[in-house]
Amino acid sequence: MKLRIELVEEGAEEIIIRCHKMDDTVHKLQAYVQSLASPGLTFYKGNQEYYLTEEEVLFFETDGEQVYAHTVSDAFRVRYRLYELEEILSRRFIRAAKGLIVNTARIYAINRNLTSSSQVQFVGTHKQVYVSRHYYKALKERMQERSTKV
C-alpha cells in the first residue's frame, strides 16, 4: 500500500482511495474517514436537542417536509434531507424507499412480497417499515454482505 499526502488550498480537500477490490480493510478505512469527516447528528424533539449515536437509529423517514429518525421507542426530527443523510451516514445505512433510509445493522427480518413492498422488521421493537421493489435488491445484497462478515 502506498500513502501520498498533497497539501491543497482550503476547501479543496478530498480523500481518494484507490484499490483493486472493496475488502474489509477498505471498508474499515472508509468508515473511519467518514466518521472523522461527518458532523455529529443532532436530533430534536420539541425544544430539546438530543445527541444519539448512529447505532441507536433504526431508520430515517420523511413525513411531509420533515425527516424523522426512529429509535426503538421514540422518533426525533433531524435537520437534514434524506439525500444529505445518505452522504453523511456510515455504510450500514441504505436507501430502502423514496422516503426511507434503514440501518441494516438493526434489521431482524425482511418479509418478501413479490407483488408489492417488502416488510422490514427491526431487532427489539414493534416498528416496521416497507422496502419498495426498486430498492429491495440493493438492500438484500447489503444484508448478505453483513451476514458474510459475521
Image (tube, rainbow, N blue to C red):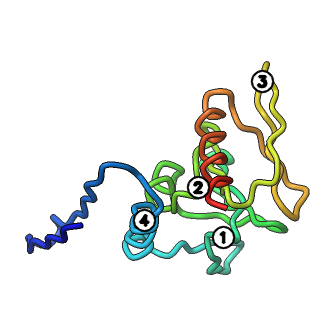
Does 6 sit above or below residue 27? below
Q: Residues within 10 Å of mark 2 (few under 14, many from 20)?
A: many
Mark toward the viewer: 4 or 1: 4
Label 3–label 1 contact, CB within 8 A = no
Q: Mark 4 highlights which residue? A: 25
Q: Tag 2 or tag 3, which sits nearer the N-term?
A: 2
On-image quarter of the C terminus: bottom right
| Badge number at residue 93 | 2
Give the quarter of the image for residue 103. Answer: bottom right
**Residue 132 placement (x, y as % from top left):** 69, 32
Q: Earlier in the sequence, mark 2 or mark 4?
A: 4
Disc with the residue nearer the chain's start (3 vs 1): 1
Outermost residue toward the top in this view: 115
Q: Residue at label 3?
A: 116
Element type at mark 2: strand
The answer to whether marks 3 and 4 mark residues whose Cβ atoms lie closer than 8 Å is no
Residue appearing at x 41%, y 68% in the figure: 34
- Image disc number at residue 76: none
Which structural element holds mark 1? Answer: helix
- N-terminal of the pair, mark 4 or mark 1, is 4
- The structure residue drawn at horizontal position 68% and vertical position 53%, both measured from the top left corner, is 147
Within 10 Å of the Cα at label 3, are there few (<14), some (14-19), or many (20+) other Cα atoms?
few
Instruction: Provide residue 90's location: percent of width, then percent of height.
Output: 51, 62
Q: Which residue is mark 1?
A: 55
Marks 2 and 4 in Cβ contact (< 8 Å):
no
Discs 2/4, front: 4
Q: Residue at x 84, y 37 (%)?
A: 111
Q: CA distance from mark 3 to mark 1?
A: 29 Å
- Residue 97: percent from the left, percent from the top? 64, 38
